[in-house]
Amino acid sequence: MVDNPVKNESPKTRTTPKVERPKLHKVILINDDYTPREFVVMVLKAEFGMGEDRAAKVMITAHQRGVCVVAVYQKDVAETKATRASEHGQKFGFPLMFTTEPED
Ligand code: TYC
């Protein structure tokens, strides 16, 4: 295309760059009345690589408010992590539950 500052002679060849960033998904810890606090902390450390202090803060937030965001990942990673962490609780007979939801 020859440059023409007055008129774009072939507008149909112009493309809009469209790079969509995949939405991140939150892993959410749900409170329950049965899982021991120490067990929740242990699972957060084991499944999400948290240190003791961070894990204890996340656990107490879920305990007090009902839910707490644990971390954000791309969709498939968030779902796998939530499933694994919930299964960790089930394996020990606890109703510990992790869910996922897309970030806004
Ligand atoms: N509420 C539980 C108790 O009092 C502890 C707990 C905290 C369980 C957070 C789940 O996501 C949870 N033993």
Image: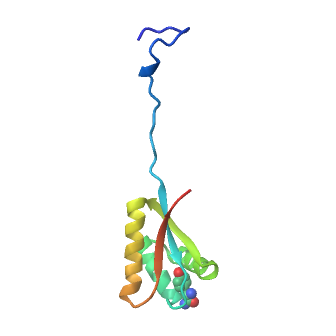
Q: Position of residue 89 (x, y in %)?
A: 41, 84
* Residue farthest front in this picture: 12
Q: Number of numbered discs present? A: 0
Q: Quadrant of residue 77?
A: bottom left
Q: Is residue 73 above or below residue 4?
A: below
* Residue farthest right in this picture: 64
Regarding ligand 1, which quadrant of the image does it lie in? bottom right
Q: Residue at x 47, y 18 (%)?
A: 11
Q: Residue at x 45, y 37 (%)?
A: 18
- The C terminus sits in image quarter: bottom right
- The N terminus sits in image quarter: top left
Q: Position of residue 66 (x, y in %)?
A: 60, 79
Q: Residue at x 55, y 82 (%)?
A: 31
Most foreground residue, 5 or 40: 5
Q: Position of residue 9 (x, y in %)?
A: 47, 11
Residue 37 left/right relative to 77: right
Q: Position of residue 56 (x, y in %)?
A: 55, 79
Q: Is residue 103 above or below residue 16?
A: below
Type of colouring = rainbow
